[in-house]
Image (cartoon, rainbow, N blue to C red):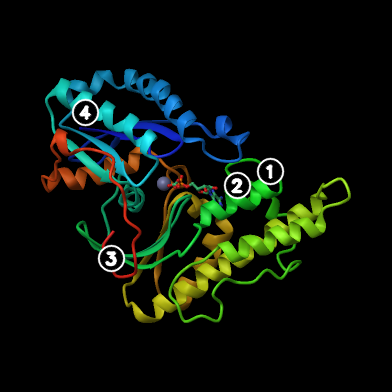
Amino acid sequence: MILSIESSCDDSSIAITKIDTRELIYHRKISQEEEHSKYGGVVPELASRLHAIALPEILEETKVYFPELKAIAVTNQPGLGVTLLEGISMAKTLSTFLNIPLIAVHHLKAHIYSLFIEKDSITPLLVLLISGGHTQIIKVLSFNKMEILATTIDDSVGESFDKVAKMMGLGYPGGIIIENFAKYGDDNKFDFPVPLRNSPLIAFSLSGLKNAVRLQIEKCKDSNGNLSKEDINNISASFQKAIKLHLLQKSRKIFEKESIKDFAIVGGASANLYIRDGYKDLCKKYDKEIHSVELKYCSDNSAMVGRYAIDAYLRNQFIKIEDLNIMATKKKQNGDLL
Ligand code: KG4
Ligand code: ZN
């Protein structure tokens, strides 16, 4: 079995996965959303302190599996430095104490592997990854070859949902909140610009849209600075529609060039059913088979870290204790490997 740890942002999570059958034996996650909600976003130092309490609490429950562990896996990039360190130091302690090797896990690759929890992996595969920190389309050719086909030049999808929710005073995380208000709104009410609509660039950009939404929110506010329920619903629906059209438009350009048959959506924002529906139609049109992640594994979790770690373990991809550290991740461009 492999014990895997995730602490890259505001979720503390530990899983135990069986190497030969890929069975997920144990998985628990403690989210800090409530604690960060009043600040409208994640406060790194607070997150780090909360991991230091939550991770040992979860670890306590996994002690019965210690004699059967063959490796410890931990997320080491990308993420918040102070929170990654909490997981990494726990992983190093366990590896030393149990005398078993360490596996370093790239958080975005783990999101891709969330598709394969308790399942076989699929390659080649085109993946849209939409999370709080990233928006990318990735061509997954093999375990070691994942190429970036498109990335964002400014904000990410999840981040823009969070910021728009914050502008309307709706709390954090914004994705599910906006999706829920949007269900009661008219997505044609406000004509927000679809980013890079007339640009040949195969890239994403969300900051212009966010500013257009900000201006509309200011216009809709009454003399006390409040928004009506109807405005909140309509702004949410129209904003979400512009994001969906943007993602679909750029994905279509890639679908026209890439013949790979399998396509998947992963990452926290892939839990958005309105966006998923848009992709179902697009995939039908381009004769692609669509795959998505079980809703409970879309946001950060250690089950996906464990699933990735099985494939790393079978390839003997271990890291020395002195080499395991937080990794500064360089900004990637199209054509770079993940
Ligand atoms: O993957 P994730 O848990 O963490 C990162 O790796 O960043 O993604 C978190 C992000 C947050 O920005 C959150 O607002 C967004 O995913 N999210 C959603 C939805 N559920 C979560 N965005 C849009 N619609 C949703 N239903
Ligand atoms: Zn994530």
Which callout, 3 or 2, points at the residue further toward the start of the chain?
2
Disc 3 to disc 2, C-alpha distance: 30 Å
Image location of residue 29, percent across then percent down: 42, 31
User: Tag 2: residue type?
Assistant: Gly
Do the residues under discs 3 and 2 have CB atoms within 8 angstroms? Answer: no
List the residue tagged with mark 4: 92
List the residue tagged with mark 1: 170
User: Tag 4: residue type?
Assistant: Lys
Image location of residue 129, percent across then percent down: 41, 58
Confirm or reject: label 1 Cβ below 8 Å from ligand 1. Answer: no
Image location of residue 127, percent across then percent down: 37, 62
The answer to which image quadrant residue 265 occupies is bottom left
Residue located at (56% from left, 34% from top)? 36
Residue located at (54% from left, 75% from top)? 196
List the residue tagged with mark 2: 174
Disc 1 to disc 3, C-alpha distance: 37 Å
Confirm or reject: label 2 Cβ below 8 Å from ligand 1. Answer: yes
Residue located at (34% from left, 19% from top)? 61
Disc 2 to disc 1, C-alpha distance: 7 Å
Disc 4 to disc 3, C-alpha distance: 30 Å
- Would you place residue 328 above or below residue 23 in this image? below
Q: Which mark is residue 336?
A: 3
Which callout, 1 or 4, points at the residue further toward the start of the chain?
4
